Image (cartoon, rainbow, N blue to C red):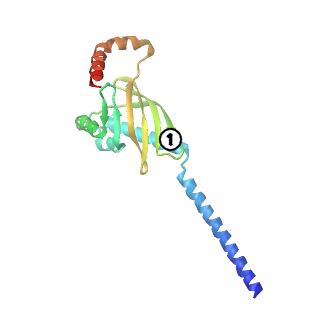
Amino acid sequence: MKKLALLLLLACISCDQSTSKKENQELEVVTEQEMAPEADIKEAINNSLENWHKAAATANFEDYFGLMTKDGVFIGTDAMENWQNKEFREFSKPYFDKGKAWNFTTLDRNIYVQHNSDLAWFDELLSTQMGICRGSGIMEKVEDTWKVKHYVLSIAIPNDNVSEVTALKKQTDTLLISKLQSAN
């Protein structure tokens, strides 16, 4: 009887260890699947941004706004262009409907990711109808797709030309500064 009890005890311990080992192996597999390599994440973000710009160039309204989050924001080059998603859709729709939105071609892009996060950020240089522009923004992973959550477009002005540009926009800026200060 003692031998049978000892055999049962050893069998239980053996089963418990093999189950525990199997659970640990499954846990490691899940962990590896959840943590995509940084290069894969950057590639997915790059693809989303390229597809977003392509959708504008081909005037594909649904694809363009499908690559923005529902609460996405687009900050344009004009000081008063702070477009929330709904307003940006309304503003953009006539351009897309005419088959001519805007065409931005990527010249350079940097993508930054944070480990185990559904947010990433980027900056890019673009060839546009306005010359070289800089875009920067935040991407959010929504389900399996990286989408533009916040985008800022700026016209790149060479340092040697800042004085000329500042003089050119001085009157407009002075009026806008006055208006904004009196509103606060």
Asked if 67 appears above or below 122 in the picture, the reply is below
Number of on-image labels: 1
x and y, in percent, of residue 7 in the image: 73, 81
Which one is in front, 131 or 147? 147
Farthest residue to the right: give it.
Answer: 3
In the rendered image, which residue does mark 1 sit on? 42
Q: Is residue 84 left or right of residue 163?
A: left
Q: Is residue 119 left or right of residue 103?
A: right
Mark 1 burial class by Cα count in 10 Å: few <14, some 14-19, many 20+: some
**Which picture quadrant has residue 29?**
bottom right
x and y, in percent, of residue 173 in the image: 31, 17
Residue that appears at 43% across and 50% down: 144
x and y, in percent, of residue 46 in the image: 46, 39
Residue that appears at 64% across and 67% down: 20
Which one is in front, 172 or 52? 172
Which one is in front, 16 or 36? 16
Which one is in front, 170 or 30? 170
Asked if 126 appears above or below 18 in the picture, the reply is above
**Which picture quadrant has residue 47?**
top left
**Which picture quadrant has residue 156?**
top left
Residue that appears at 74% across and 85% down: 4
> The disc labelled 1 sits on which kind of residue?
Lys
Asked if 160 appears above or below 134 in the picture, the reply is above
Query: Quarter holding the C terminus?
Result: top left
User: Which secondary structure, mark 1?
Assistant: helix
x and y, in percent, of residue 18 in the image: 66, 69
Farthest residue to the bottom: give it.
Answer: 1
Query: Quarter holding the N terminus?
Result: bottom right
Residue that appears at 28% across and 18% down: 178
